[in-house]
Image (tube, helix red, strand yellow):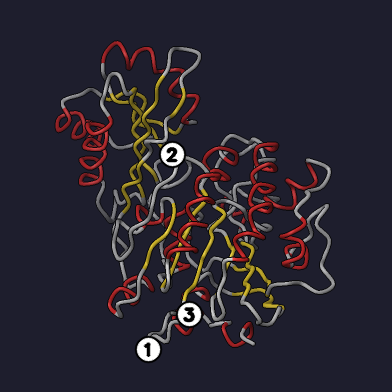
Amino acid sequence: MTRAVVLVLDGVGAGEMPDADSYGDAGSDTLGNLAAAVGGLDLPNLQRMGLGNLHRIQGVPPSPEPDAARGRMAELSSGKDSTTGHWEMMGLQLAEPFPTFPSGFPPEVVEEISRRTGRGVICNRPASGTEIIEELGPRHRKTGELIVYTSADSVLQIAAHEDVVPREELYDACLTAREIMRPPRLGVARVIARPFVGEPGGYTRTPGRRDFSLEPTGRTLLDALAEAGIPRTGVGKIDDLFAHRSITTEHVPDNGRGLEVLSRQMTEVGSGLIFANLVDFDMRWGHRNDVEGFRRGLEQVDAALPDLLALLRPGDVFIITADHGNDPTTPSTDHSREYVPLLCHVPGGRAADLGLRETFSDVACTLAAHFGLDETFPGTSFLEEVRA
């Protein structure tokens, strides 16, 4: 009846890593800068767990007796995207970053997408998703052309109005693009469907987003759990990030619903891994530099924590962390190369200082030990440090 819960606050970084400058992210500090920008964060439950002990955050002082083990983790892989972060968290490190396309995709890619979908392609450059649909939405609705764009991350995104391109057709177009964008030269981490609705000046993206990721290039903790017959479930885009290999998760429209589903799963699931991602920090607030939205999102999670922690059973492991940064206070609207927070609560366990961990893969090592797997991953388990 062993369980583990991993809650990923997508984009909630905890200070720039030493190599941040090489990624264009010098000075990024999602939690620290956000707290300063709003005059201090009010997160009493995260504060009691030890969030203020692992990083300097205005309004969240260190707890004299934290309820959880705490530390920060560095990303050993090259990159700063969700796929890289989640893969490393599950024990798969990447020596080379996924390719990016700062000048747009090669002409042969655009031509092949157009030929195979039967629709023209417009844009083909890095762009803000909300801005590009306002700019090109009227033309798209008139011509039916697909809006294909990218960002600083390793993504190919296709936006389409649901009245022009039905959702299933958009998903098929993304699957086509996924087949075209293969490693090594074209192997973007994700192809993302971005359906939207509305009229000019009021276009809005719908919850129909879907991510079509590369299949993991090596073995992950999820694969090991699957082979051992240990259940794996979760919330949000986790299954998309692993190309639906060894895990199925329940997709949700927002963080609020995600917390509700996580609570239900913690009530109903008797054993195994519950792996949840709350994407609004990244998708809705980080990428849009929405400081107030980000603050409210953290307060929402903080308010939900007492009820979630009350659902833990003896022997459970509950981990809160992130996959990268996305500092809403900087001019950039992209991910940032940051350390991520690590909070680990074990009922009746020890609130150890876990220090600075060398890799996100320490999570995989810890969970492998927790589930009694005869499996090794890069990194070091902290299970003995947190057990009673």
Amino acid type indicated by mark 1: Asp
Q: Indicate left or right for 175 with 16 as reference.
A: left
Asked if marks 2 and 3 touch (Cβ < 8 Å), the reply is: no
Q: Name the element at disc 3.
A: helix
Q: Which residue is mark 1?
A: 374
Sequence-earlier tag: 1 or 3: 3
Q: Is residue 57 above or below residue 5?
A: above
Q: At label 2, which amino acid type do we have?
A: Pro
Residue 102 numbered mark, or none: 2
- Residue that appears at 38% across and 33% down: 194
Distance between mark 2 and mark 3 Cα atoms: 35 Å
Inter-mark Cα distance, 1 to 3: 11 Å
User: Which tag is nearer the camera, tag 2 or tag 1?
Assistant: 1
x%, y% of residue 55? 75, 63
Q: Is residue 229 left or right of residue 20?
A: left
Mark nearest the camera among 2 and 3 is 3
Residue 249 got which mark? none
Dot placed on the residue nearer the N-terminal end, 2 or 1: 2
What residue is shown with label 3?
Answer: 365
Nearer to me, 229 or 309: 309
Q: Element type at marker 1?
A: loop
Tell me which corner region of the image, top left, top right, bottom left or bottom right, holds residue 385: bottom right
Are the residues flagged by discs 2 and 1 in contact, CB closer than 8 Å?
A: no
